[in-house]
Amino acid sequence: MGNQVLRNFASGGNQFGSIFMVASDIDRGIFTESYINCGNEEWRKDGLEFKGMLSEDKGGKMHILVNKKDNQLLLSSIINFGGRLGKSGPSSGEDSCCLAVDFTNFMRCTRR
């Protein structure tokens, strides 16, 4: 649902210094040229729209939080026949607008 909200903001001409994508259930290649040019579907241009929301004068970055143990995104990877951004991180060949942060082992529950 968060990605849908981001799509709505992208079409409104909004500008941000940083965008944080957490548990993103979108194709991991969304920012690559091969993904964008693979078809004529409007949603293939979402990566360009998201990138267009970054403030260039402030060096805007897209922060992608990755959890390789996210089982819900594993199921989505199987259903959608491809890696999801929140589980696998961005595809190789991404440009400098993306900064992936691996949170796989960050959120561990400990008992005392």
Image (cartoon, rainbow, N blue to C red):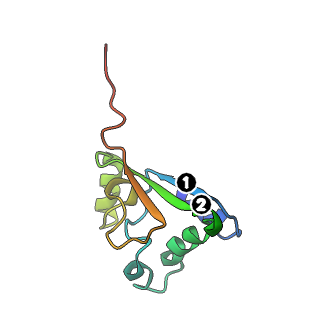
Q: Residue at x 61, y 69 (%)?
A: 56
Quadrant, the N terminus: bottom right
Horizontal side of 59 relative to 27 (left or right) equals right
Q: Secondary structure at mark 1?
A: helix
Task: Please report the residue visible at 53 percent of the width from the left and 60 percent of the height from the top.
Answer: 61
Please identify the quarter of the rendering in which residue 42 is found: bottom right
Give the vertical position of 5 relative to 36 (above or below): above
Residue at position x 40%, y 76% from top? 32
Q: Quadrant of residue 104?
A: top left
- Element under disc 2: helix
Residue under numbered circle 1:
2
Residue 26: x, y in percent? 43, 63
What crowding class fits label 1: few (fewer than 14 Cα within 10 Å), some (14-19), or many (20 or more)?
few
Q: Can residue 1 be spotted in the picture?
A: no
Provide residue 34's location: percent of width, then percent of height.
37, 82
Q: Amino acid at mark 1?
A: Gly
Residue type, mark 2 in image: Leu
Q: Dot 2, how many residues are within 10 Å of its Cα: few (below 14), some (14-19), or many (20+)?
A: some
Q: Which residue is mark 2?
A: 6
Question: In 3D space, how far apart are the residues under numbered discs 2 and 1 (Cα atoms)?
Answer: 6 Å
**Quadrant containing the C terminus in the rendered view:** top left
Residues tagged 2 and 1 counted as in contact (Cβ below 8 A)? yes
Q: Is residue 108 visible?
A: yes
Residue nearest the viewer, comparing 58 with 102 = 58
Counting from the top left corner in percent of width and height, residue 7 is at 59, 65
Residue 104 relative to residue 95: left or right:
left
